[in-house]
Image (cartoon, rainbow, N blue to C red):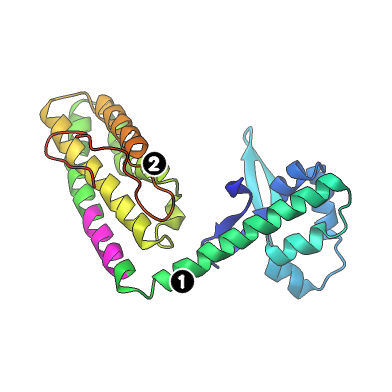
């Protein structure tokens, strides 16, 4: 449900898309695009609240609109029926939730706790980068040049995946999530070193680290505010769960 309303990470506003609206309000997307293009609103309102974007499907690009809460409200105000009313309520609740999160992020940035966590996160990423550099050479030595080429992006995406964020959100998360990112990056860093010493194949190293992160997030889940440790378990020698 949360993916119905996301964040424009540049403007830092809550947004949804014409694709999601078409799906949930049971409208043809082409008809919805026409409705947006033909809306009886000012050019300035359209420009402020609707952004034309592209998505790729089966090798072809298609248009869709990303829109703000005001854009969404203007578009769906004429939708009628019990199902439409139900979805309007759900979207309003999700916009409220996302806007509360955006406000909290802005507030967090003013706190020393956030600033310290952000600084520590950069230190962890430098450590991770330093570990990935020999891993790249290690992979090339095994003639796995694709693994070597994409090593940094693959490990970064892996951490993002298990923190349930995307790359653009790294600068707009809470202090607790910054610490979560640093923890997972620390796990990756130490596991890379440990597994290279065991002379594992580079793709096995990636799969092992993926498995380790999966175990960690299951044992130490995160509710968006804080850690919720279930129990202590050593994931590998020398590392203690926080």
Q: Residues within 10 Å of mark 2 (few under 14, many from 20)?
A: some
> In the rendered image, which quarter contains the N terminus?
top right
Q: Over which residues does the magenta segment extend?
A: 115-124
Residue bearing mark 2: 162
Q: Residues within 10 Å of mark 1 (few under 14, many from 20)?
A: some
Q: Determine whether the residue tagged by mark 2 lies in a helix, strand or loop.
A: helix
Q: Is residue 117 magenta?
A: yes
Q: Is residue 116 above or below residue 170?
A: below
Q: Position of residue 60 (x, y in %)?
A: 66, 38
Q: Is residue 185 magenta?
A: no
Quarter assignment of residue 197 = top left
Image side of residue 230 versus residue 10, left or right: left
Seen as rendered, the residue at the extreme front is 231
Q: CA distance from mark 2 to mark 1?
A: 24 Å
Quarter assignment of residue 168 = bottom left
- Residue at 77% from the left image edge and 62% from the top image edge: 73
**Looking at the image, which is closer to me, 84 or 206?**
84
Q: Is residue 107 above or below residue 18?
A: below
Q: Position of residue 225 (x, y in %)?
A: 41, 56
Q: Which SS type dominates the magenta stretch?
A: helix
- Residue at 33% from the left image edge and 67% from the top image edge: 114
Q: Determine whether the residue tagged by mark 1 lies in a helix, strand or loop.
A: helix
- Residue at 32% from the left image edge and 32% from the top image edge: 215
- Residue at 74% from the left image edge and 60% from the top image edge: 72
Residue bearing mark 1: 106
Q: Position of residue 188 (x, y in %)?
A: 25, 41
**Looking at the image, which is closer to me, 115 or 241?**
241
Q: Is residue 18 above or below residue 217?
A: below
**Looking at the image, which is closer to me, 156 or 24?**
24
């Amino acid at each position: 449900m949360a993916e119905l309303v996301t964040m424009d990470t540049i403007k830092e506003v809550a947004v949804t898309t014409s694709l999601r609206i078409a799906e949930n309000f049971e409208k043809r997307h082409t008809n919805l695009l026409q409705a947006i293009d033909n809306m009886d609103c000012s050019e300035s309102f359209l420009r402020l609240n609707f952004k034309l974007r592209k998505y790729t499907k089966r090798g072809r690009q298609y248009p869709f609109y990303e829109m703000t809460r005001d854009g969404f409200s203007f578009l769906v105000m004429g939708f009628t029926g019990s199902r439409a009313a139900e979805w309007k309520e759900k979207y309003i609740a999700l916009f409220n939730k996302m806007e509360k999160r955006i406000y909290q992020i802005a507030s967090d940035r003013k706190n020393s706790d956030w600033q310290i966590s952000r600084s520590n996160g950069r230190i962890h990423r430098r450590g991770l980068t330093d570990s990935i550099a020999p891993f790249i050479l290690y992979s090339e030595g095994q003639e796995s040049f694709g693994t070597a080429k994409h090593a940094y992006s693959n490990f970064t995406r892996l951490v993002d995946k298990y923190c349930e964020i995307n790359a653009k959100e790294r600068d707009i998360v809470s202090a607790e999530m910054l610490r979560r990112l640093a923890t997972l990056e620390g796990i990756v860093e130490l596991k890379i070193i440990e597994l290279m010493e065991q002379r594992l194949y580079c793709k096995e190293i990636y799969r092992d680290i993926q498995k380790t992160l999966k175990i960690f997030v299951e044992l130490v889940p995160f509710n968006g505010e804080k850690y919720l440790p279930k129990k202590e378990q050593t994931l590998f020698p020398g590392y203690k769960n926080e």
